[in-house]
Image: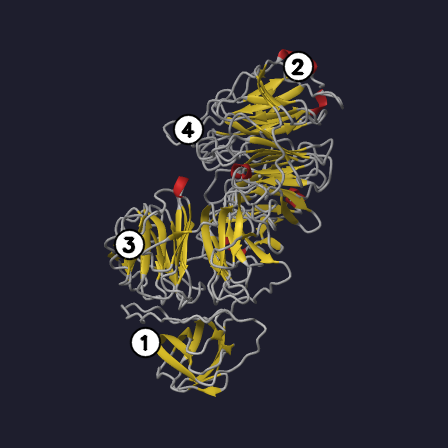
Amino acid sequence: MRSRLLGALAAVVSVGLVTALAVAGPATTPAGAATTAGAYTWKNVAIGGGGFIPGIIFNQTQPNLVFARTDIGGAYRWNQTTSSWTPLLDWVGQSNWGYNGVVSLATDPINTNKLFAAVGMYTNSFDPNDGAILRSADQGATWQTTKLPFKLGGNMPGRGMGERLAIDPNDDNVLYLGAPSGNGLWRSTDSGVTWSKVTSFPNVGDYVQDPTDTSGLASDNQGVTWVAFDQGTGTTGSPTKGIYVGVADLQNTVYRSTDGGVTWQRIAGQPTGFMAHKGVIDQVNDVLYIATSDKGGPYDGSSGDVWKYAIKTGVWTQISPHPSSDTANDYYGYSGLALDPEHPGTVMVTGYSSWWPDTFIFRSTDSGATWKQLWNFTSYPNRSLSYTLDTTSEPWLNFGNTAPVAPVASPELGWMTEALAIDPFNSNRMFYGTGATLYGTTNLTNWDAGGTITIKPFVSGLEETAVNALISPPVGAPLLSALGDIGGFTHTNINAVPSEMYTSPNLSSGDSLDYAELTPADIVRTGEIDKSANPNVNRIGFSTDGGTDWFQGQEPPGVTGGGSAVIAADGSSTVWSPAGTGVYFSTSFGGSWTAATGIPQGAVVASDRVNPKKFYGFSAGKFYVSTNSGAAFTATAATGLPTSGSVFVKAVAGHEGDIWLAGGSGATAGLWHSTDSGATFTKVSTVDSALNIGFGKAAPGQTYPALYAIATVAGVAGVFRSDDEGGTWVRINDDQHQYGNIGQAITGDPRIYGRVYLGTNGRGIVYGDLTGTVTTPPPATTTTAAPPPVTTTTAAPPVTTTVAPPVTTTAPPVAGTGCHVTFEKTTEWAGGLIANLTVNNTGTTVVNGWTVKFTFPGDQQVTSAWNATVTQTGKAVTAVDAGYNATIAPGGNTSFGFQGTWTSNDTAPSAFSVNGTTCS
């Protein structure tokens, strides 16, 4: 996704005093670094949500000022005018990527422009940096930073508890922070600029999810979890006396100070055996409410209770909708907790850890004496509902489950529902977070009168997916994605939310994607699935219609994870490097697999984009080549390649044997280029280091694709473009658009020069366009393709393309005086075919722009094409160049291809014309 307390400070020994160290807003570009060439605009590819929302915070004094925090994707501010969310931490870069893990947010009720965020991704070694407090005086538009001497864990177990960060509502110079890992309670008395440990606080917490976890993730002490002020015990301008603090301790979970934080006591009579995930005070009725669970969440929790504490009398009362003693109904913990300030005594709570058949949301209008449940069983498995769920704006939220089996519904109300908040100025508006989106309603009080409420996503602008792979084929949908937690999508329109995620197979996370360069309707993807729960779902899927429809392949023995798979240039074979076993190849779209030889387990694999028989592999500093469709690999003599760290290998379309390798760690990290199929590599001297590389449409006047790299150039880390094969680079992002931990996925668009798609780890997919020069392609037309062949086919021989020298884009089209067209059916099966056409300029003048026409003798129908725009009227076919291949020099050639269907006659055409000239 705060020095008036002199008496209290005298009683609190200041330990580990922390001061403000740096401004966390955009930094200036160092001298000598590459600068941006041409303005870029950055936007999200529309998905909507996609991750866990652990916190929703309404400002208590300014209407419509609302914030949301995410576990890995930063923080957002609500825009009431557009009903959308504005991201606030896109300036976070690679050096401080953990700041996108937002542990807690606090919005100032006195000066509503002030906003504070406690940030840090992990408390173990995963995040190399300590946590920080971010301070904003303009509601999150700009920030300053105070670094802490310990780590915070926005993506750690227990992250749904809170809020850990709180502002004194009477004196906003005073803030408290509950810390994990045994670091206790911390306080600031200068509005968050400096912090010191409250040494008088008696309990740092002791709950850990799994003490045996050696990674430090599940074995961390979840610590001090929330802070709440009893505003009535203070006066404006003076610190509040009554402060309540929650602790991750099953026996001692709530503490109180009645003297402004000087001394602290465990509240007598409190419940034991559970920890308070939330604590909220009803200021009118002087009641503290807590929602408890036996686990820290956000995934786990098998029992819990809801309690209220009468502050004046010291009496605890259990008010659980289903008490933990009710063994028939007690199988989840409580967490989401909200009060309605306009109607004291109205309280809501969630059963956050009920994964089946749905989450629970409860509401009471009499301080917990009685409760209404958002759904109830009638006669099992039937349920009566007090809500309607409208997900038309986010239709993929059914997670591919179009035929749910009662009592499970699809879509569901959610899971991991630890965040719940009622608008303090509008009793009808309520938001709550889930593991996949943010839901809300604007007619909440209908429920009180026995009516139904309408729940729908309120997630526009809030993008929280972790991106593992991206591809942008030359035809069809402009983008396909492989995403953590939600599988991925075929994005037929990048500005519209996809209608559904991938199915057949329906995988819990996507790992890799690849398309066949010469037959781009053929696509392979891999991902993750819990095989114990889904034994018939395999970790690899194929599409032969550009990602509209999918079918799953088989798995070779020993597979434990999706790994990566790549497909031949013409789709004739697939090479798969899954987790748990060695590298395999298939010539039947995964119908069967044969172990590849000569390449180690876990190798990175890639396919040549011209030669269908050629594949590449990389592992531990060695490069491997296969020239027989992946059956056997041989190590090349290339040296100097990285021996450790993440590495990406990608081949260039239209250039056989042209390979780029990015990644590594330490002294061998960088970017390398080979033009001889990996026999030798040259390290790119213009790049200090690189994480990943992708390719897009060539710049005007160029024939080689534009390169896009996540890299460090001249000491500056960013996203860079090169239009001259890596000779020079320009930075295309800026300090306001860094997106934290990027590196896993990047690709240019082969149809739009300057466009790049960038995968983030928690901020979804973003794309950059050159300002004023880009036109958005229309959504792809869905076509029904032939079923894939199930027998081994003979791949077409590699086509050598002679690249013409660059010519100016303003030259008018000029037809050559001679042409020759070769038509070759590279694959044919009953009812379908794949064909490749090579256009040769046999004349003496340059062809600048070409149109090929021919007529089918049979009943063939083109379903998809690549390297050309192909249309068909009756039997007549017209193919127009794709722009990047418009130029054919005298004696040169270019090629394009298509996939099609046929019923009774697949006779090849024999007559062709180019720009109106009949060809031989």
Q: Residues within 10 Å of mark 4 (few under 14, many from 20)?
A: some
Residue 830: give its label. Answer: 1
**Label 3: element kind:** loop
Report which residue position mark 2 lands on. 8
The answer to whether residue 310 is seen in the rendering is: no
Q: Earlier in the sequence, mark 4 or mark 1?
A: 4
**Label 4: element kind:** loop
Distance from disc 3 to disc 1, alpha carbons, whole Å, reads 40 Å
Q: Do the numbered discs 4 and 1 sit on residues whose CB atoms are within 8 Å? A: no
Q: Nearer the viewer, mark 2 or mark 1?
A: 2
Report which residue position mark 4 lands on. 219
Type of amino acid under label 2: Ala
Distance from disc 4 to disc 1, alpha carbons, whole Å, reads 58 Å
Distance from disc 4 to disc 2, alpha carbons, whole Å, reads 34 Å
Q: Earlier in the sequence, mark 3 or mark 4?
A: 4
**Label 2: element kind:** helix
The answer to whether residue 813 is seen in the rendering is: yes
For the point 75% across and 23% down, which residue is it? 237
Q: Earlier in the sequence, mark 2 or mark 1?
A: 2
Q: Earlier in the sequence, mark 4 or mark 2?
A: 2
Q: Nearer the viewer, mark 3 or mark 1?
A: 3
Type of amino acid under label 1: Ala
Q: Residues within 10 Å of mark 1 (few under 14, many from 20)?
A: some
User: Is residue 455 placed above or below 750 in the rendered structure?
Assistant: above
For the point 53% across and 56% down, which residue is it? 756
Give the x, y percent position of residue 282: 67, 28
Type of amino acid under label 3: Thr
